Image (cartoon, rainbow, N blue to C red):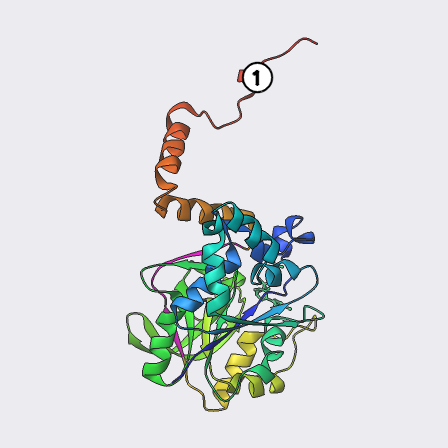
Amino acid sequence: MDITKAIIPAAGLGTRFLPYTKAIPKEMLPLLDKPAIQHIVEEGLSSDIKQFLMITGRSKEAIANHFDIAPELEHFLQERNKSHFIAGIDRIIRQAEFAYIRQAEPLGLGHAIWLARHHIGKEYFGIFLPDDIIVGKQPGLAQLMRVARQEKASVIAVQEVPLECASSYGMVAIKKQITPNLFQVSHLVEKPERKDAPSNLAIIGRYVLSHKIFQALDETGTHAGGELQLTDGITQMMKLNEKVFAYKVQGTRYDIGTPIGWLKATMGLALQHPEYTSHMRKYIDEFHTMQSGLYDSSKNILHDI
Ligand code: UTP
């Protein structure tokens, strides 16, 4: 099973991160020295994905600019022997192919994926939701690709969550447990109330899907509010005789779609990065011992004017 293409839907409005996301795509939030979307593409390349199809919208031009050459900047850095600053992104631009489709209206994740139907042949393909950053020994998508090849079927990444959080996720109903980390799926439920959650397995932002999803999305009705849900499309795809498995991806997952999730990701990555870890540990220790980083009104110095 050849899996060489991936869709990155990035046309959402990012309401949980307003006002930052009013004019700047949240996919360009920095995680240390790289925008979040670069971490996603690096995970894709490490999983042997060669073609990335981004679904974008208004105010998202910065994403395409990041994955394009910048001759003036390159020339400027070359003259000063500083080309190493952009060596990583240059390598990505040479290794990967990028294509872009604009989603004129945010009609849902299912609609964003459906827009890519003419770019994917009769093959399995990956999906990365760029809010989810997965850090681990093996790239997140590569783990799903291994299962997809083994089962010759579609696979979605899941994570155990407390049931009170079920209403924030698509949740998986299990048909059969295959191994401690692998389940065959019977259907999916989008953002259920705690009492209606079919399990504690929540869908997170990586998928390997059959091209049958496009026919299934064609057949799936939109929800109230006019959004086409990917979870409904996947449930419909199972009616077209496509088996779907859920795999508990190994690694740490950060949801950078909110300020607190982004802060946790930034700190988590800094603590693991050889260049930053000692600075971060020292800073965190200072917080414990001297509370030095915290605002304390009693320490204010009043200046007479
Ligand atoms: P979310 O449901 O998290 O929406 O989309 P969002 O706009 O990104 O963020 P909030 O919830 O308003 O803060 C999940 C993924 O689907 C993409 C988003 O860009 C995100 O990667 N998406 C969503 C689209 O591409 N188009 C849509 O119409 C909806």
Q: How many marks?
A: 1
Q: Is residue 225 left or right of residue 42?
A: right
One can see residue 164 in this view: no
The residue sitting at 39% across, 37% down in the picture is 280
Residue holding disc 1: 300
Q: Quadrant of residue 243?
A: bottom left
Where is residue 230 drawn, in percent x and y?
56, 75
Is 250 contained in the magenta span?
A: yes
- The kind of secondary structure the magenta stretch mainly shows is strand
Rendered-image quadrant of the C terminus: top right
Q: Ligand 1 sits in which quadrant?
A: bottom right
- Residue placed farthest to the bottom in the image? 241
Where is residue 19 drawn, in percent x and y?
67, 48
Is 53 contained in the magenta span?
A: no
Where is residue 292 drawn, in percent x and y?
45, 24
The residue sitting at 46% across, 55% down in the picture is 87
Kind of residue at disc 1 = Asn
One can see residue 301 in this view: yes
- Residue placed farthest to the top in the image? 304
Q: Is residue 138 left or right of residue 88?
A: left
Q: State whether residue 273 is above or below residue 40.
A: above
Q: State whether residue 184 is above or below residue 142.
A: below
Magenta stretch, residue numbers? 245-256
Graded by Cα atoms within 10 Å as few (under 14), some (14 to 19) or many (20 or more), the crowding at tag 1 reads few
Rendered-image quadrant of the N terminus: bottom left
- Residue placed farthest to the front in the image? 79
Where is residue 269 drawn, in percent x and y?
41, 49
